[in-house]
Amino acid sequence: MTLRVAVIGAAGRMGQQVCRAVEEAADLEPAGRFDVGDDLGDLGGADVAVEFTVPGATLANVLHCVERGVHVVVGTTGWTDESLHQVRAALAVQPKVGVLIAPNFAIGAVLTMRFAAQAARFYESVEVIELHHPDKVDAPSGTAVRTAEVIAEARRAADVPPAPDATASGLDGARGARVDGVPVHAVRLRGLVAHEEVLFGSAGETLTIRHDSFDRESFMPGVLAGVRGVVDRPGLTVGLEEILDL
Ligand SMILES: NC(=O)C1=CN([C@@H]2O[C@H](COP(=O)(O)OP(=O)(O)OC[C@H]3O[C@@H](n4cnc5c(N)ncnc54)[C@H](OP(=O)(O)O)[C@@H]3O)[C@@H](O)[C@H]2O)C=CC1
Ligand SMILES: O=C(O)C1=N[C@H](C(=O)O)C[C@H](O)C1
């Protein structure tokens, strides 16, 4: 069966790449391209909309799609418990519709989060560093936030005490931001795309897990897997790992 796919944020860095990927996929058909200021209307008759816009716009776009019975694959970051709650409420009146929200569609980034969760209970110390292109509008990255959260959950479950840190004075921000107690550092550098390092340490050893997206092409297999998977997954799914059965 051919799926008709609309792209919201189609003029953006990710949106352009998604439009190309949809055009090249034999089982998908472009239904429409939407960007800032466009009326989403009936999404061009799409079965699935792919949404890569900005944190301030994504909730309204997703709710619009759900209300019209269109499945949605969302890559935009900045989701909160409150905005996820609003999506669940909208889905309750459209029980056949599926929404997939994933902070990162690159397979290696999903594996990095999984490996980090596995390693978390074995180490005293942990820090997350995310490195991105300087045109990114949010910090830290959605991926780094999720990575820190899964690490913190695993450490709590294993009763690992807070990481040691004797810092008593210094400049604000020097130790990064705390996400669920885990220090997260954001680097913005021309030449980069999307990268993450998770550093673990214990007496006499460290473990570094690193993922690099050198090209936005790296997100496309995950996005297309999401498009094909979301139509058979009513309700809200958070994280590509659910679709990949990881
Ligand atoms: N989950 C994942 O794997 C990935 C997630 N991302 C996330 O995706 C999002 C987009 O990233 P990226 O493509 O680099 O960003 P861009 O800024 O390149 O693209 C966003 C596009 O959305 C447009 N836009 C803004 N508001 C609206 C709106 N209300 N309706 C429709 N379109 C709108 C922008 O227009 P204008 O510029 O005119 O405002 C722009 O064309 C970010 O949140 C980023 O973190 C990025 C890469 C991978
Ligand atoms: O803005 C980006 O580029 C990216 N955003 C996502 C995030 O914030 O985690 C995913 C990836 O890191 C690229």
Image: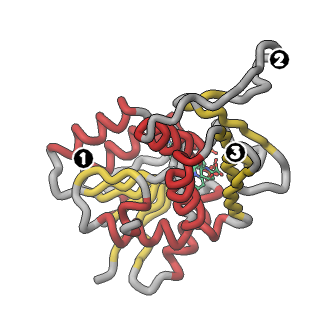
Which disc is residue 67 wearing? Answer: 1
Q: Three-letter amino acid code at disc 2?
A: Leu
Does dot 3 land on a helix, a strand or a loop?
strand
Residue situated furthest bottom in the rendering: 26
Which residue bears the numbered disc 3?
A: 201
Disc 1 or 2, which lies upstream in sequence?
1
In percent of the image, x 30 and y 59: which residue is there?
71
Q: Secondary structure at mark 1?
A: helix
Residue at disc 3, CB closer than 8 Å to ligand 2: no
**Residue drawn 46% across the image and 53% down it:** 102
> Which residue is more in the foreground, 65 or 221?
221
Is 37 above or below relative to 224? above
Q: Is residue 170 left or right of residue 56?
A: right
Crowd rating for badge 2 (residues with CA inside 10 Å; few <14, some 14–19, many 20+): few
Label 3 vs 1, first from the N-terminus: 1
Three-letter amino acid code at the position of disc 3: Gly
